Structure formats: structure tokens, C-alpha cells
Amino acid sequence: MSTSAAAASAAAASSTCATLLRRSSPPSRVPANLRGSLPSRSLSSPSSSRAPVSPVYAAASASPDGSRGTAAAARKKLLIFDAEEYLAESLAKYTARLSGESVAERGAFTVALSGGSLIKALRKLAEPPYLEAVEWSKWHVLWVDERVVPKDHADSNYKLAMDGLLSKVPIPASQIYGINDALSAEGAADDYETCLKQLVQDGVIAMSQVTGFPKLDLVLLGMGPDGHVASLFPGHPIVNEKQKWVSYIKDSPKPPPERITFTLPLVNSSAHIALVVTGAGKAGAVHKAFSEKKSSSDLLPVEMVSLQEGLITWFTDKPAVSMLSSI
């Protein structure tokens, strides 16, 4: 299928998750690797002007405030970019590399998107060399959170992602899993969890032997100035959910009020997490997330994002890290 034809097909898709699942089939195990066809520079290498300033906070390193990191903190990697253009290039390379590795290993790449400025940061995936090199037919796209509005509504994360990325790349429409926007918030959350369970049963999504939750290949997150991720807001009871994969809220502090969201156990079960955080308005939450002075009583949702099996990579700019004293 040509890119233009696939884009038109994807843009027109408005099926519910359950409908799409009936049309999809388990992935085939086709060994493929992008590393030979994509730029070979290391993601964190400062060898060119388009590289990040430095990967200043990686496994087993000291914290940005000079203290030694905890085990959880040591699984964070902080990349700081001079310009948003460089961040977008590095994020595309990172995502394409993980796609190639997952397709080679499992025959599929499962990725969950958030909304906001994240979609703009992913735009270079729709440009050469990634447009031609990525095995888009192996992608399965979900949403970390979604507003309970029609898919063509201005507030829809589905619409944002379709307009900004998904309509421009040849992912089969049957592998793009939007929520059922005809249901209530509670019904849409239950339906989306059923969708995930079917994808696990079909072998598209792996299950983590460590967490007992689905193990998505990549979860892409943004962060609000208040430290919220997905639709998990500070102080909201939903951040304490331990059993459900997908939950809902009807009282979001940011409009629109009704949303569904992955729970923290599901987010934290993924193989890889990328946090894209830019701008001076996020500096306070970034500082708190990297501080060693933590109290379980006032943790921000972003501080509760933690992987047992992988590395969380932060893609940031200088204003966002301006309160980290050793940067």
C-alpha cells in the first residue's frame, strides 16, 4: 500500500477497538532490524551539533543534585537538547530503533501515545529516513489516555495523533486502537481494557513475568507543569489504583473532565518509557522528580513512574532542567 493510500485509510478510520480487533490477526515473526538502514550515531552521543547536550543522568550515576541515586532513580536517563528540532530528531531515532528491535524479536511493535506537544515531537517519524525504513505494518498503536469526546473533536487525542502523525505513515487502520467514543467514561475504560486483553491473547502484547501486567514495547508520555502524566493527576485517587489496567475519571482538573487512562501499574510494566518534557513551566516538577528528598505523602504522578525491567529516558530542553543545580 502506498503511503498516501494508507494515510487516507487511516484518517478515515473511526472504528471502535473491538471492531478493529475482529479484523486484526496475530503478528508474524519476521526478523527485521533497522539499525543498518538508519543513522548509526549513538542516541546519546554528543558527537555532532544535533546531539543532546549530554546524557547527564544515567544508570548508576550521581543525581543531578550531587547525591547518589536510588535504584529507581538510577534507571532514569536525562537527555537535554539545545533546540526542539534536535529533540525531535533524537526521539524519532530512539522510537525507530525500538521498533526495529521489537519487530525483530516479536514480529510486532506496540506503542502507546499521549496527547499534547508529544505528537509534534514525533513528527520526524513521518519524514525520511524513518518513513521508508520503519516497518509500519508491524505497529500497533494505543493511547495512554484519552478524553471521552468524539474522535473528530478538537480535544480528542485520537484526532491530534491522526492529524499530526498517524495519517502520514502507513500503519494499517486495523492496528490503530481508538476508544469507543459512544460509551460513557466507565464503559469506554472497561472496553479499552478488554481490547488490551484481546491483544495479549492474540500475542500482540507480551505479559511481564515480573509485574503480571501487559508489557507494551514503548509508552510515550508528556508531563504537565503539575507533574501529571497521562490523565493521572496529583492527589487524585486514581493514582492509587493497583488492579485495573485502564481506569476513568469524571473530574479532571483540566478540561474536558471525563477521560480514560492507563493506570500506573500498566504504565510501569512497559519495556520502555520516553518522557518528553520541555519548557520552563515544567522546571519545578522536573526538579522534584530528580530530587532525592522524597516523601511518599506528596509524590507527583511523574515521580511514581518507575520501571523494574527497563530505562526511562527523559527528552528535555534547557529551560525544563533549569532548576537542577549541577546541570
Image (spheres, helix red, strand yellow):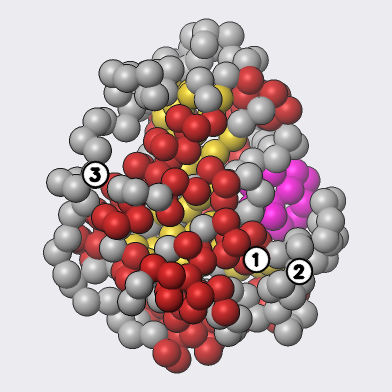
- Would you say 233 lies left or right of 46 here? right
Q: Look at the picture and state if 9 lies above or below 323.
A: below
Q: Which comes sooner in the sequence, label 1 or label 3? A: 3
User: What amino acid is labelled 3 in the image?
Assistant: Leu
Q: Residue placed at 80% from the left, 66% from the top?
A: 258
User: What amino acid is labelled 2 in the image?
Assistant: His
| Image location (x, y in percent) of residue 292 | 56, 21
Q: Give the secondary structure at mark 1.
A: helix
Q: Nearer the viewer, residue 200 or 167?
A: 167
- Would you say 247 lies left or right of 71 here? right
Q: Give the secondary structure at mark 2.
A: loop
The span picked out in magenta is: 228-239
Q: Which residue is mark 1?
A: 159
Q: Nearer the viewer, residue 153 or 234?
A: 153
Q: Which comes sooner in the sequence, label 2 or label 1? A: 2
Q: Residue placed at 57% from the left, 46% from the top?
A: 120
Magenta part mainly helix, strand or loop?
loop
Q: Which residue is mark 2?
A: 153
User: What amino acid is labelled 1 in the image?
Assistant: Lys
Q: Residues within 10 Å of mark 2 (few under 14, many from 20)?
A: few
| Image location (x, y in percent) of residue 5 | 43, 76
Q: Is residue 37 visible?
A: yes
Q: Which residue is mark 3?
A: 38
Q: Quadrant of residue 295?
A: top right
Q: Which comes sooner in the sequence, label 3 or label 2? A: 3
Magenta includes 230?
yes
Q: Residue placed at 75% from the left, 44% from the top?
A: 234
Q: Nearer the viewer, residue 103 or 210?
A: 103
Q: Look at the picture and state if 259 lies above or below 306.
A: below
